[in-house]
Image (tube, rainbow, N blue to C red):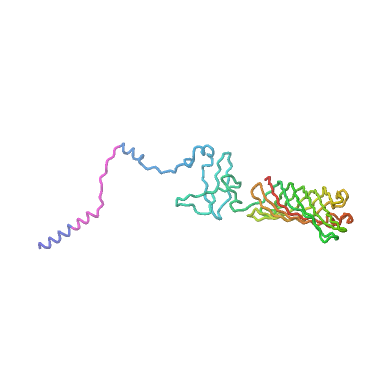
């Protein structure tokens, strides 16, 4: 009986302990003073706000461009790249989108940022520069050439006659683009001069002699050229025709016995217009200077009407010229 009572009492004790652990613990209310109740709302944590964008810039920037500080440039890459947006302002600072070919570095290494604009400046580049393109633009300037002139042809009396000497030309040109990058028309007005000569030896009745013939020519030339180049190249090729108008042409034949002189234009021995095919190439070294080389091939006989009984070596002569020069661009 005692064992039975002991078991019942043990079971009741265990149940009471378990019930006490499962019940919630009630805490007594804590009295607060009126001063504490008034300070409680002030103790609430206010939401953290980001510092205004003006804090990121210097006082000078805020003074010069306060209306441009509302937003900073955003990175635009790849196919989503948009054209630069320029906000109209009378201030000196204008923010534009940033273009980058790679993700922004996060390792702490220096990152070079390029600002792209419609018009290049000291700190920016335009879209053509970014893509490596070199556009053709309307321009004009001065050109000068120096080279060798050749008058040659089969005159029927001798097997072959040729005269050669120094030639130079100087004038103004103008370039009209036909498209954005590849083709343009180039023309201009040039004043040209050349002096060519040659010597011929003869033997008559045992005596030895020499003839020296020379031409001194002045003319005005108007090249009409098609200029071609690659979109990413400063090298251009020129092809076209060139009419030349004779201004002065003096022929002199000198021997040991006498000297013969004649004005070819005054005597009507010379054609007034010479036609040539012109081939050339050049490179624009920078914005203002370029270098060129040209070859011209004459198509017509200069002296159709010269009397062959005076000097047979003048008939059937046409000109060829090889020259190099420099170009000075105004724009």
**Magenta segment includes 19:** yes
Single out the residue that lies furthest toward the front: 206
Q: Is 50 in front, or is 330?
A: 330
| Residue 167: x %, y % from top left | 76, 50
| Image quarter of the N terminus | bottom left
The residue segment tinted magenta is 14-33
For this rendering, which residue is in front, 175 or 90? 175
* In-front residue for pair 38/310: 310
Relative placement, left or right, of 115 versus 264 is: left
List x then y, in percent, for residue 229.
67, 55
What's the residue at 55%, 41% (across, down)?
93
Q: Residue furthest left?
A: 2
Tell me where residue 37 appears, x and y as whole percent.
Answer: 32, 39
Image coords of residue 293 (percent x, y): 70, 53
Residue 21 within the magenta-colored segment of the rendering: yes
Q: Is residue 9 above or below residue 112?
A: below
Question: Count of labels shown?
Answer: 0
Residue 205 placement, left or right of 8: right
Q: Residue at (25%, 45%) from the top-left corner?
A: 28
Q: Quadrant of the C terminus?
A: top right
Report the front residue among 321 and 176: 321
């Amino acid at each position: 009986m005692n064992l039975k009572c002991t078991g019942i009492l043990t079971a009741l004790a265990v149940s009471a302990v378990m019930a006490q652990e499962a019940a919630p613990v009630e805490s007594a209310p804590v009295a607060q003073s009126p001063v504490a109740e008034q300070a409680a709302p002030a103790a609430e944590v206010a939401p953290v706000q980001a510092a205004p964008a003006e804090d990121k810039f210097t006082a000078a920037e805020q003074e010069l461009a306060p209306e441009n500080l509302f937003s900073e440039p955003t990175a635009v890459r790849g196919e989503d790249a948009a054209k630069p947006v320029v906000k109209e302002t009378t201030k000196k600072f204008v923010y534009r989108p940033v273009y980058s070919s790679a993700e922004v570095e996060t390792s702490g290494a220096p990152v070079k940022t390029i600002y792209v604009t419609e018009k290049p400046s000291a700190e920016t580049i335009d879209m053509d520069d970014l893509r490596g393109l070199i556009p053709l633009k309307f321009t004009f300037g001065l050109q000068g050439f120096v080279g060798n002139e050749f008058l040659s042809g089969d005159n029927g009396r001798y097997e072959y006659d040729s005269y050669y000497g120094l030639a130079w030309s100087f004038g103004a040109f103008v370039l009209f683009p036909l498209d954005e990058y590849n083709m343009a028309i180039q023309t201009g007005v040039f004043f040209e001069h050349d002096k060519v000569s040659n010597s011929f030896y003869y033997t008559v009745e045992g005596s030895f002699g020499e003839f020296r013939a020379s031409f001194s020519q002045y003319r005005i030339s108007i090249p009409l050229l098609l200029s071609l180049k690659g979109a990413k190249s400063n090298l251009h090729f020129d092809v076209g025709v060139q009419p030349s108008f004779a201004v002065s042409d003096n022929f002199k034949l000198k021997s040991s016995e006498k000297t013969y002189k004649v004005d070819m234009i005054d005597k009507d021995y010379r054609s007034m217009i010479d036609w040539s095919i012109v081939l050339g190439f050049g490179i624009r070294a920078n914005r203002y200077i370029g270098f060129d080389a040209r070859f011209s091939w004459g198509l017509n006989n200069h002296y159709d009407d010269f009397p062959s009984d005076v000097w047979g070596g003048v008939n059937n002569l046409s000109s060829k010229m090889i020259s190099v020069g420099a170009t000075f661009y105004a724009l």
